[in-house]
């Protein structure tokens, strides 16, 4: 089997995300929100997914790249008759003391050489491909009606050729504005070039204000830029991925909708943003989590919509063929019904920097004691309970080591916060619960194999227990930590640097692909125990699993190195950022030397 990699890049402005294929087609774009119906979704169905492409009439080669330190994507097409470039971007820049981030996709088509023969095709759809939109021609635009809001294509390209699906010779620079709701009101060329220049300036300034060391700096920058546009700025939520139903491996049925915010990711995402010094995003995400904390009772859901909606009913879109014919296509995610008890600790840990990092103003934190007290009550309520665990087993429940670890870590964070706000009773409560969580963790220890298993009473190993080392539950310099790491790598690590979540059968059988975030956790664990040379070597192995734009998927096939799962996976990029940061700190070398 040939190596499979995703042939798209992403653009976005924290209001929406779009995937641009190397053939220039917009293969995925949901409007007006990350979790809305797709407007273009040929990624999941080549016939019903619509199309927005700028294709040549003959055979071609393609080159795709980002403008340095931006989320502006360029695709160069070379044919026998000529060469042209398509620059795609989502406008984002400061305007009127706020960010301008409209539901607007801008495409600039430039002649580079010769006389290329091209065709512009714009056929948006809605209701996940069930609705074809009515096409209405205007004086200098085309409107697509039928999704509740107007979709408008404003352009200086010949409308007749677009409407009649005709090829024509590219002679001058063309501009295409696709808008949802509010249309473009202004000159085409000058507006596009102004928006492009301001957007480039915004992203490059954002990167200049980032704290990123020199260890694989280019890859960390790309990961940071990718993570940034997975945040829905209106509420602060950060989604796991912009896509749904890209299979974990072909024919697996493991096709999930990842356009939601998982609380289990909180600690890792906060860490990644904190490491690069971006507090605006951290605070927005914190506000999102805080709002959930105040409105819920004794239980969180594992995931919420970007606007904190709870009811994420999973449906099968059986009218869609699925990615490369791999169904089912799922809309919504049944995991919102699961019991997942690590999330209470995750929420508490996310608060800790706001009380221990003096770059935040502590006095701005209101209701601190009540917020921590409620969080501890949630941990107390669930600390002895079996759950679905981090990997969301659908038909089995255990007292998971990982769940209790994050309850332990959450209580540790609560104790530190309590000391900061001088609340002795709260500190005593937190310490008491830490001890209860630690008891369950120790019940997972197998003294014969010198390893912690994934759950009480289970013999199986799980990569999530690498976090025992990174969370400092185990002293990284202790023999127990080093032996635990060796046992995990002996069973779950592949020779080419990949790492399985686990190898025992779950609800869908045995996993057939590795989970990329686990490989980055492994790198971190190596650095923690002092095996820094090993950490660097294993980190470098993982770089080859990116696509042509340094974007990473969720899963990787051990045999072929193929990318699978939803893409790009914010979680994988967070793993890269945190692993690079951990190694960089261990190397402790001066920047630029």
Image (cartoon, rainbow, N blue to C red):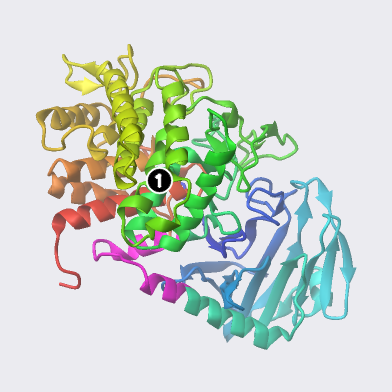
Q: Position of residue 436 (x, y in %)?
A: 31, 21
Percent x, y of residue 592: 19, 73
Vertical placement of residue 531 versus 281, above or below: above
Magenta stretch: give its range.
Answer: 203-226
Left or right of 88? Residue 557 is: left
Residue nearest the viewer, comparing 247 with 47? 247
Q: Is residue 216 magenta?
A: yes
Which residue is label 1 attached to? 350
Q: Quadrant of the N terminus?
A: top left
**Residue drawn at the location 33% of the way across and 65% of the way down:** 218
Point 60% across, 59% down: residue: 18
Toward the viewer: 519 or 419?
419
- Mark 1: few, some, or many residues within 10 Å (few <14, many ≥20)? many
Residue 252: percent from left, percent from top: 53, 30
Q: Could one spot residue 555 in this view of the protein?
A: no
The quadrant of the rendering that contains the C terminus is bottom left
Residue 330 is a magenta residue:
no
Where disc 1 sits, the SS reads helix
Q: Residue at x 47, y 59 (%)?
A: 281
Displayed quadrant of residue 361: bottom left
Relative to 24, is 155 above or below?
below
Question: Picture quarter containing residue 187?
Answer: bottom right
Q: Identify which residue is drawn at 35% across, 56% down.
A: 274
Give how far across and how far down residue 37 sits, in percent.
72, 49
């Amino acid at each position: 089997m040939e190596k499979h990699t995703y042939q798209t890049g992403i653009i976005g402005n924290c209001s929406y995300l779009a995937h641009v294929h190397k053939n220039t087609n917009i293969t995925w774009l949901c409007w007006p929100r990350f979790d809305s119906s797709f407007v273009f979704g040929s990624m999941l169905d080549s016939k019903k997914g619509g199309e927005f492409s700028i294709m040549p009439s003959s055979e071609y080669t393609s080159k795709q790249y980002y403008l340095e330190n931006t989320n502006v994507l360029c695709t160069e097409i070379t044919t026998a008759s000529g060469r042209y470039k398509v620059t795609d971007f989502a406008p984002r820049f400061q305007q009127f003391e706020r960010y301008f981030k409209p539901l607007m996709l801008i495409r600039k088509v430039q002649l580079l050489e010769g006389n290329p023969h091209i065709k512009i095709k714009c056929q948006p759809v809605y209701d996940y491909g069930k609705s074809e939109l009515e096409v209405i021609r205007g004086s200098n635009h085309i409107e697509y009606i039928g999704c509740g809001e107007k979709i408008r294509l404003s352009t200086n390209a010949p409308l007749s050729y677009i409407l009649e699906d005709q090829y024509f010779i590219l002679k001058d620079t063309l501009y295409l504005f696709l808008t949802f709701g509010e249309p473009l009101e202004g000159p085409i060329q000058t507006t596009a070039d102004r928006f492009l220049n301001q957007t480039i300036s915004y992203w490059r300034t954002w990167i200049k204000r980032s704290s990123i060391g020199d260890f694989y700096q280019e890859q960390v920058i790309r990961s940071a830029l990718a993570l940034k546009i997975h945040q829905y700025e209106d509420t602060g939520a950060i989604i796991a991925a912009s896509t749904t139903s890209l299979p974990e491996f072909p024919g697996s049925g493991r096709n999930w909708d990842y356009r939601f915010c998982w609380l289990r990711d909180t600690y890792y995402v906060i860490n990644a943003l904190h490491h690069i010094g971006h507090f605006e995003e951290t605070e927005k995400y914190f506000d999102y989590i805080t709002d959930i904390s105040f409105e819920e009772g004794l239980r969180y859901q594992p995931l919420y919509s970007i606007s904190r909606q709870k009811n994420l009913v999973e449906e099968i879109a059986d009218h869609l063929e699925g990615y490369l014919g791999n169904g089912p296509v799922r809309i919504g995610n049944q995991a919102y019904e699961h019991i997942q008890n690590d999330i209470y600790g995750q929420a508490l840990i996310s608060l800790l920097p706001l009380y221990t990092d003096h770059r935040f103003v502590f006095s701005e934190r209101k209701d601190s004691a009540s917020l921590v007290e409620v969080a501890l009550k949630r941990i107390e309520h669930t600390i002895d309970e079996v759950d679905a665990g981090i990997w969301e087993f659908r038909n089995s429940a255990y007292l998971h080591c990982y769940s209790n670890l994050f309850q332990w870590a959450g209580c540790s964070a609560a104790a530190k916060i309590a000391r900061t706000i001088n609340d002795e009773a709260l500190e005593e409560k937190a310490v008491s619960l830490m001890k209860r969580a630690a008891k369950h963790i120790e019940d997972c220890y197998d003294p014969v194999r010198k390893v912690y298993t994934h759950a009480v009473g289970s013999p199986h190993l799980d990569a999530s227990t690498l976090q025992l080392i990174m969370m400092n539950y185990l002293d990284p310099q202790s023999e127990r930590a080093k032996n635990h790491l060796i046992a995990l790598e002996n069973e779950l690590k592949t020779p080419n640097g990949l790492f399985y979540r686990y190898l025992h059968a779950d609800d869908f059988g045995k996993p057939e692909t590795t989970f990329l975030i686990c490989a980055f956790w492994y790198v971190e664990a190596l650095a923690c125990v002092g095996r820094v040379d090993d950490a660097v070597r294993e980190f470098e192995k993982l770089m080859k699993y990116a696509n042509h734009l340094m974007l990473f998927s969720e899963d990787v096939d051990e045999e072929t190195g193929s990318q699978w799962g939803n893409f790009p996976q914010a979680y994988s990029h967070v793993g890269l950022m945190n692993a690079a940061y951990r190694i960089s700190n261990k190397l402790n070398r001066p920047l630029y030397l």
